[in-house]
Image (cartoon, coloured by chain):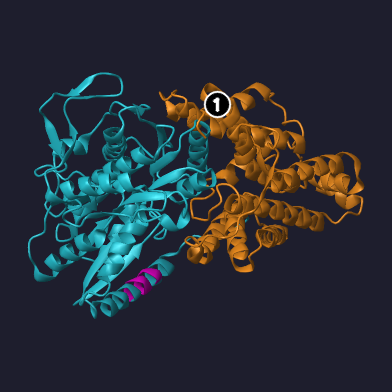
Chain colours: A cyan, B orange
């Protein structure tokens, strides 16, 4: 190029003036709606993935009908600086005052950083480990004891398996995933201690090709019941159905995807959780910083049993479910060894579903084949 | 189902994974090979792949025929290739920058129009059972091969033959090696490149349909996870030769299946390293085959990265 355009002084002044003018118009136009409570939901994947994001989006959708509430949602937001930009734009442009960044990796450092910058905005994160004194007061976390659902999955799987080998397609070895793998395995081993669970880590929350490969290779090893902890269980459930395996669902109900092999599933039930947060915000009531709940509190639910589930399996799972509903049920209790034979928990010690120790789990229990 | 394969599961998974996972790599890489042979780089094929996957799935759902879906995916891919081919002809348009723009556009369009199709289940492509002779259900499952794989192999063979021994193939190579020489001989450089890019887009579209209509057989926004970009890199890895594209695609497919298969037989330490196997392989091959100070063998002289 022979000549280069450089911004002159006048062009810059004009441009800045125009920008200020438009920004002013934008702000005044938006202020008209300031009476509504604006709530922001941020998802890491598509809202209709038959999985993690769908479960949250269904919870959000249930709040749409509440009076005086306006929802802003953004999907496919990466666990990077992107989510900070999304949060800032929801706060500054949409005037959101309550934010739900729903993915695991949003918590630290992204949500914490933005929360320090905007102390008047409330942030609640799904799954994070909020710590008083360590994290800002306007942040917090909520989660459900879905491990209990995976324990019930395991009981049904344990009754249904013929090969005594179960499969688990997992994304990353983080505490929540490990708790699910362990609970599923312990549920099945409560039926028959000879049962083993083969786990395969794909390394990412959503990698359809790798999830399909993992499911196929589990089928090749003679595994006949499979479950998973990835963002969208659709690929795992559909591949398993094609290979003639049975599946236990996760996150949401996938029964439609596997009419023959779907046994039951551990599902989120976020609607209650979101409604109670929003009601607190509308009344100006204090927010819980650390909100947890299980089957009894309606934070999670189980899918209806599929046609392949036998009578004994139903009865066993239903009776355990009734016990869990009473509260204080412990899946992880001593004596317990890890899968390398090391003693983990002494006899007499039991971690009930509410135990905070479970949220920093870093082991795989006896009966799981795999390593972190 | 009851008998396990044990350690034999690993070679079986790698072999069947090579075909299952490698087919989209094959389509995109031979498509890109054709485009690059004519002297242009189309980096937008990742977008074409994703758009092809969305189109194939949607059309299959509405028409009830997965093959019509495949055709539609190819046509949308060709349209995208044609757009790239046309725009690159305009003065001062850089094909690499435009390719990146086309990639983002393709993904954006696919995400936007593909939204209503994430939930429904579309009719899938049937597979050909080549394992009928075997008693083992695992071998039979591994030998369920989709017809598109054979289409891809046939395309690779046809391109190879065409480049080596037909006039049309020669014209593409001349245009790709020296636009000035092609013009002096009276060949329409822009038209040849336009057609080569459109055909490359068509093939990439087919690869997308394979993803959504056969394996993993579902449409969502993460379906490709960068396979289109990898396949473009495979062309350089394969030194612009269609048969080598086939080998490279199979190699990458097989390497992708290695990680899960090893974990399934109990080799579970360091699975992140196994997942990096395809990339380590690429680095090794590039390092071994490179000749300092010289162009890569088979590289078209007109590629904008060569100049």
Nearer-the-camera pick, A80 or A8: A80
Nearer-the-camera pick, B231 or B283: B231
Crowdedness near tag 1: few (<14), some (14–19) or many (≥20) residues, C-alpha within 10 Å: many
For the C terminus of chain A, the image quarter is top left
Q: Position of residue B8 (x, y in %)?
A: 56, 23
What residue do we see at 62% from left, 62% from top? B60
What residue do we see at 29% from left, 43% from top? A150
Q: Position of residue A251 (x, y in %)?
A: 34, 52
Q: Position of residue B121 (x, y in %)?
A: 53, 60
Q: Residue A299: within the magenta?
A: no
Above or below, A151 against B115 in this view is above
Residue at mark 1: chain: B
Question: In this rendering, does residue B252 appear at all?
Answer: no
Left/right placement of residue A154 relative to residue A31 reads right
State the residue lying farthest toward the front. A311
What residue do we see at 85% from left, 45% from top? B174
Dominant SS of magenta comes to: helix
Quickly name the residue at label 1: B10
Nearer-the-camera pick, B79 or B141: B141
Which image quarter: residue B16?
A: top right
Which image quarter: residue B55?
A: bottom right
Question: In this rendering, does residue A247 appear at all?
Answer: yes
State the residue lying farthest toward the top. A341
Magenta stretch, residue numbers: A15-21
In the structure shown, which secondary structural element does the residue marked by tag 1 occupy?
Answer: helix
Q: Residue A20: within the magenta?
A: yes
């Amino acid at each position: 190029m022979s000549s280069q355009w450089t911004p002159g002084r006048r062009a810059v002044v004009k441009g800045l003036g125009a920008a200020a003018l438009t920004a002013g118009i934008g702000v005044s136009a938006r202020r008209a709606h300031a009476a509504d409570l604006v709530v922001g939901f941020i998802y890491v994947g598509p809202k209709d993935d038959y999985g993690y994001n769908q479960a949250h989006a269904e919870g959000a959708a249930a709040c749409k009908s509440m009076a005086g509430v306006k929802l802003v949602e953004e999907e496919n937001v990466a666990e990077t600086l992107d989510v900070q930009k999304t949060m800032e734009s929801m706060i500054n442009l949409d005037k959101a005052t309550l934010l739900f960044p729903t993915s695991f990796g949003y918590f630290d450092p992204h949500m914490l950083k933005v929360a320090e910058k905007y102390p008047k905005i409330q942030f609640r994160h799904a799954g994070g480990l909020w710590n008083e004194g360590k994290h800002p007061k306007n942040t917090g976390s909520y989660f459900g004891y879905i491990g209990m659902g995976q324990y019930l999955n395991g009981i049904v799987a344990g009754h249904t398996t013929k090969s005594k080998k179960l499969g688990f397609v997992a994304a990353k070895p983080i505490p929540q995933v490990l708790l699910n793998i362990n609970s599923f395995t312990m549920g099945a081993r409560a039926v028959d201690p000879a049962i083993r669970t083969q786990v395969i880590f794909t390394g990412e929350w959503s990698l359809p090709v790798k999830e399909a490969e993992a499911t196929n290779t589990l089928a090749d090893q003679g595994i006949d019941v499979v479950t998973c902890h990835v963002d969208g269980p659709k690929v795992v459930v559909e591949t398993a159905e094609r290979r003639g395996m049975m599946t236990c669902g996760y996150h949401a109900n996938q029964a439609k995807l596997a009419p023959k092999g779907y046994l039951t599933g551990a599902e989120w039930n976020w609607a209650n959780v979101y409604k109670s947060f929003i009601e607190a915000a509308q009344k100006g009531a204090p927010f819980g910083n650390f909100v947890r709940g299980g089957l009894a509190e309606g934070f999670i639910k189980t899918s209806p049993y599929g046609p392949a589930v036998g009578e004994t399996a139903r009865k066993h799972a239903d009776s355990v479910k009734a016990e869990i509903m009473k509260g204080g049920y412990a899946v992880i209790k001593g004596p317990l060894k890890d899968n390398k034979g090391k003693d983990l928990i002494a006899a007499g010690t039991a971690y009930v579903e509410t135990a905070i120790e479970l949220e920093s789990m870093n082991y795989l229990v006896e009966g799981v084949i795999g390593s972190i | 189902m009851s008998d396990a394969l044990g350690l034999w599961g690993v070679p079986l998974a790698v072999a069947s994974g090579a075909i299952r996972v490698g087919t989209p790599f094959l389509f995109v890489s031979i498509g890109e090979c054709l485009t690059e042979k004519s002297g242009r780089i189309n980096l937008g094929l990742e977008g074409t792949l994703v758009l092809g996957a969305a189109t194939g799935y949607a059309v299959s759902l509405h028409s009830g025929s997965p093959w019509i879906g495949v055709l539609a995916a190819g046509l949308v891919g060709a349209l995208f290739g044609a757009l790239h081919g046309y725009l690159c002809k305009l003065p001062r348009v850089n094909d690499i920058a435009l390719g990146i723009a086309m990639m983002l556009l393709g993904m954006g369009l696919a995400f936007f129009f593909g939204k209503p199709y994430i939930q429904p289940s579309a009719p899938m492509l049937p597979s050909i059972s080549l394992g009928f002779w075997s008693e083992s259900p695992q071998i039979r499952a591994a030998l369920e091969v989709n017809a598109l794989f054979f289409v891809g192999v046939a395309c690779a063979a046809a391109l190879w033959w065409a480049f080596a021994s037909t006039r049309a193939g020669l014209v593409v190579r001349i245009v790709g090696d020296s636009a000035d020489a092609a013009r002096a001989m009276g060949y329409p450089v822009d038209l040849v490149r336009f057609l080569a890019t459109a055909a490359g887009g068509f093939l990439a579209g087919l690869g997308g349909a394979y993803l959504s209509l056969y394996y993993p057989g579902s449409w969502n926004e993460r379906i490709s996870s960068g396979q289109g970009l990898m396949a473009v890199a495979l062309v350089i890895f394969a030194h612009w030769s269609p048969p080598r594209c086939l080998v490279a695609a199979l190699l990458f497919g097989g390497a992708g299946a290695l990680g899960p298969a090893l974990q399934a037989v109990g080799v579970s330490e360091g699975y992140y390293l196994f997942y990096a196997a395809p990339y380590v392989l690429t680095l090794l091959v590039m390092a071994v085959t490179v000749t300092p100070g010289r162009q890569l063998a088979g590289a078209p002289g007109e590629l904008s990265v060569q100049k």
